[in-house]
């Protein structure tokens, strides 16, 4: 009878209703990945690695993009209504929005992990980089290259950027360097200082924007740059750039494994945050 039923189903092109099956089984076998953008290479690395790890565990990864706080809250509401078994979240670039739905999901131990950075609340599972150790190493590399002063360029406003900024200033002062944040930097500080200037930021774009805005004050000042993730093209006007390469594929793989463990029966929910070491620090020197 079973063989005849399957033969008839194949002949008629029948496919089971997965929504009905999920309702009966109490599981969709899907994980959502929520993000505000798929434009950056790093985000694509996260998606690819997470999809591979989840597929090996019998889950499909579905991508959901939110464009504003309202869209973010709406998608979290879909999770709260059972449209997925678990979720990975890549936070937006700026401060994380307050979300009553996210707090409700965390309170009921919904399997969820933030990638790269979380909302900054206690008890939110996050897999990210060891930003303190990475920033300290960048500052030490700049100090070895001969800088006497350091500026951390803050263009965004989120927990990771703030942590990197405070760490960079503290490490520079520990090494006997003058140090300041770009937002509270008097123009005269640039012009009156002595020796090469180290400039640290989360991205190449932040450094370019800051140098353009302060082009007059920076004229004639020798600089060294340090950034996270990537630097394209020549390091001009710096003779060298130190680039901290984060392990985005490792973050996604680790987060996916945690979700697979949390969705398995009898596995405890964990709010632990993990901080992966850098893959490496690249040194890009001027060729032209």
Image (cartoon, rainbow, N blue to C red):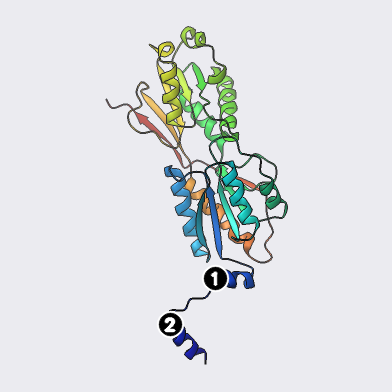
In the rendered image, the vertical position of residue 168 relative to residue 47, given as above or below: above
Image: 284 above or below 276: above
Crowding near pointer 2: few (<14 within 10 Å), some, many (20+)? Answer: few
Q: Which mark is residue 18?
A: 1
Q: In terms of depth relative to the viewer, which is nearer, 217 or 179?
A: 217
**Residue at left 46%, top 24%?**
142
Q: Is residue 170 above or below residue 122?
A: above
Is residue 268 something one can see in this rendering? yes
Query: Is the residue marked by circle 1 packed among few (<14), some (14-19), or many (20+) residues within 10 Å?
Result: few
Q: Residue at x 46, y 83 (%)?
A: 9
Circle nearer the viewer, 2 or 1: 2
Query: Under tag 1, what secondary structure?
Result: helix
Mark 2 / mark 1, whichever is N-terminal: 2
Frontmost residue, 185 versus 65: 65
Q: Which residue is mark 2?
A: 12
Residue at 52% across, 92% down? 1
Residue 211 coordinates in the image, percent (x, y): 42, 20
How far across and down, in percent of the image, does residue 18 sit?
A: 54, 70
**Residue 242 quadrant:** top left
Mark 2–mark 1 distance (CA, rounded to whole Å): 18 Å
């Amino acid at each position: 009878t079973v063989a005849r039923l399957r033969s008839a189903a194949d002949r008629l092109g029948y496919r089971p209703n997965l929504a009905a099956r999920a309702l009966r089984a109490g599981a969709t076998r899907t994980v959502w990945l929520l993000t505000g953008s798929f434009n950056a290479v790093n985000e694509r690395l996260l998606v690819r690695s997470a999809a591979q790890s989840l597929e090996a565990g019998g889950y499909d990864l579905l991508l959901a993009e939110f464009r504003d706080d309202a869209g973010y809250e709406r998608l979290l509401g879909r999770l709260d209504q059972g449209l997925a078994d678990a979720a990975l979240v890549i936070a937006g670039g700026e401060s994380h929005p307050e979300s009553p739905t996210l707090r409700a999901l965390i309170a009921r131990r919904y399997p969820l992990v933030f990638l790269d950075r979380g909302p900054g609340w206690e008890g939110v599972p996050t897999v990210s980089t060891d930003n303190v150790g990475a920033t300290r190493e960048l500052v030490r590399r700049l100090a070895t290259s001969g800088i006497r002063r350091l500026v951390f360029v803050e263009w965004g406003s989120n927990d990771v950027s703030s942590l990197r900024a405070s760490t960079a200033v503290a490490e520079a002062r520990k090494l006997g360097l003058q140090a300041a944040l770009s937002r509270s930097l008097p123009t005269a500080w640039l012009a009156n200082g002595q020796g090469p200037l180290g400039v640290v930021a989360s991205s190449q774009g932040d450094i370019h924007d800051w140098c353009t805005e302060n082009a007059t004050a920076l004229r004639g000042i020798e600089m060294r740059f340090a950034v996270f993730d990537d630097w394209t093209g020549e390091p001009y006007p710096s003779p060298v750039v130190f680039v901290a390469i984060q392990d985005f594929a490792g973050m996604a793989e680790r987060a996916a494994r945690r979700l697979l463990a949390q969705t398995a029966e009898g596995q405890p929910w964990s709010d632990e945050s993990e901080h992966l070491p850098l893959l490496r620090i690249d040194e890009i020197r001027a060729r032209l």
